[in-house]
């Protein structure tokens, strides 16, 4: 479970900003199940999610995919030359299997500058490792800490994280935190959602998720009565005739397709190749009219993708980060997605949902109940120098019955665009004058 995330010097975030998921009012809970981040366009909401995703990328892939000597592909704050030259910092505070961990890393354009991992069994700090630009040290309470320090010093490249390197060297003390980065956090961004082989597998006849996903799609009132995974085949010219693959062997665009691609005019020198793939078909209405995924709305595809990822987090635990949760979704669907994370009956494994949004209705109520608690609401705004500032609603000491939606739209908390009707009209008139 994620207690907090701190970042500094990443894109529009210059000074250290921290998202805290520790409850402010319920002292019985260890972490919050939901955090919503609100703010104007270009204020930096997406950059907060991007920073956490960069940290995941550094842990998972810096050892294997960042080429030696290629530096660190970071994105520092560029509106201030002095800040751009400073290191970027990323820190997570986690609770995994009942143990608290603090992991942090600082990077510049060339290398990892500092990196540390501490555990807190029985609330006492235990150093697992500390790293500077020139040295690696394993905690003195760990067995053979000197030999392991030498081993990791030799294995770790300047532009690779020690956490990722140590995991590949089978250092068991780092594995809970590494596994959280590898499989305990999922991201969704607002782009064109399609159907991938990975998603389609959830609708295979033997999938444990199939029936639950179909029921959720029906409950969303999208007109979908069922979803089927159908096997399709077609012929295409090839120098070497070969049979097609089974589900999951390839991620090519032809593999999951709304319709089989046209093979074109066969070349007489080429042998025809039979390709085999799968088509995800949505059955609509009582008559079960079959439509391909390409015939579905963007909102339907987005909701389906969100459902699959959310279901995995709800079943296993972890964190689900969604940038612009309201994109292409009706507010009621967004509300229902939030509610399944809020409800301990549907969220038995302690999954967490972190999202950004422009949708101020999520600050209000639905069916007489608050969608978000006071300590689950965060705001982002951009200062006059272009730097992002993150702050919680609790800074304003809101009353329990306060109309948060109305006060936010009225500008009481900031984090809203300052729009002038006069400036808009003047800009249009100037544009007309220039054309003349």
Image (cartoon, helix red, strand yellow):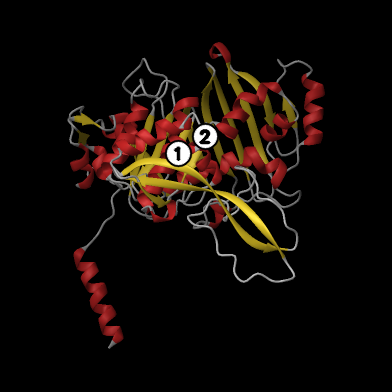
Look at mark 1 in the image and give the residue it sits on.
321
First reached walking from the N terminus: tag 1 or tag 2: 2
Q: Is label 1 in contact with label 2 (beta carbons under 8 Å)?
A: yes
Identify the mark at residue 426; answer none if there is no mark: none
In this view, 230 is above or below 208: below
Q: Which part of the image, by quadrant, shows the C terminus?
A: bottom left
Q: Is residue 209 left or right of residue 87?
A: left
In this view, 162 is above or below 250: above
Distance from label 1 to label 2 (Cα)? 8 Å
Q: Residues within 10 Å of mark 1 (few under 14, many from 20)?
A: many
Going by the picture, which residue comes out furthest to the bottom? 436
Q: Secondary structure at mark 1?
A: strand
x and y percent of residue 390 in the render? 39, 41
Instruction: In this rendered view, identify the residue nearer to me: 116 or 263.
Output: 263
Identify the mark at residue 185; answer none if there is no mark: 2
Name the residue: 41% across, 36% down. Answer: 354
Q: Secondary structure at mark 2?
A: strand
């Amino acid at each position: 479970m994620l207690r907090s995330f701190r970042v500094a010097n990443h894109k529009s975030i210059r000074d250290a900003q921290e998202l805290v998921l520790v409850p402010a009012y319920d002292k019985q809970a260890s972490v919050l199940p939901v955090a919503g981040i609100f703010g104007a366009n270009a204020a930096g909401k997406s950059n907060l999610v991007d920073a956490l995703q960069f940290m995941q990328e550094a842990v998972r892939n810096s050892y294997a995919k960042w080429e030696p000597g290629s530096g660190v592909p970071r994105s520092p704050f560029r509106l201030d030359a002095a800040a751009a030259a400073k290191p970027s910092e990323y820190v997570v505070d986690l609770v995994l299997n009942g143990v608290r961990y603090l992991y942090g890393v600082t990077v510049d354009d060339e290398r990892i500058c500092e990196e540390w991992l501490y555990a807190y069994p029985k609330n006492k700090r235990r150093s697992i490792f500390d790293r500077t630009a020139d040295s690696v040290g394993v905690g003195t309470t760990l067995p053979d800490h000197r030999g392991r320090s030498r081993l990791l010093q030799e294995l770790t490249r300047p532009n690779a994280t020690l956490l990722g390197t140590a995991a590949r060297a089978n250092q068991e003390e780092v594995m809970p935190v590494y596994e959280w980065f590898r499989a305990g956090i999922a991201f969704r961004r607002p782009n064109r959602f399609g159907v991938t082989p990975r998603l389609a597998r959830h609708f295979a006849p033997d999938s444990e998720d199939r029936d639950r996903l179909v029921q959720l799609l029906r409950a969303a009132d999208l007109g979908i009565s069922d979803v089927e995974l159908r096997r399709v085949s077609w012929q295409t010219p090839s120098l070497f005739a070969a049979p097609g693959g089974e589900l999951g062997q390839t991620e090519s665009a032809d593999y999951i397709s709304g319709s089989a691609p046209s093979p074109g005019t066969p070349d007489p020198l080429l042998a025809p190749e039979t390709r085999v793939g799968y088509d995800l078909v949505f059955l609509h209405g009582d008559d079960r009219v079959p439509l391909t995924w390409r015939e579905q709305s963007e909102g339907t595809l987005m909701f389906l993708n969100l459902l699959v990822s959310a279901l995995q987090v709800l079943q296993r635990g972890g964190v689900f980060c969604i940038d612009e949760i309201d994109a292409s979704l009706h507010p009621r669907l967004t509300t229902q997605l939030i509610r399944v994370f809020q409800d301990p009956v549907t969220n038995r494994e302690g999954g967490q949902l972190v999202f950004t949004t422009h949708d101020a209705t999520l600050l209000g109520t639905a069916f007489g109940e608050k969608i978000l608690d006071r300590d689950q609401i965060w705001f982002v705004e951009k200062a006059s120098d272009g730097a992002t500032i993150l702050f919680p609603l609790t800074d304003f000491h809101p009353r329990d019955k306060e109309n948060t939606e109305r006060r936010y739209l009225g500008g009481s908390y900031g984090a809203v665009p300052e729009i002038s009707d006069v400036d808009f009209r003047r800009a249009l008139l100037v544009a007309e004058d220039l054309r003349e």
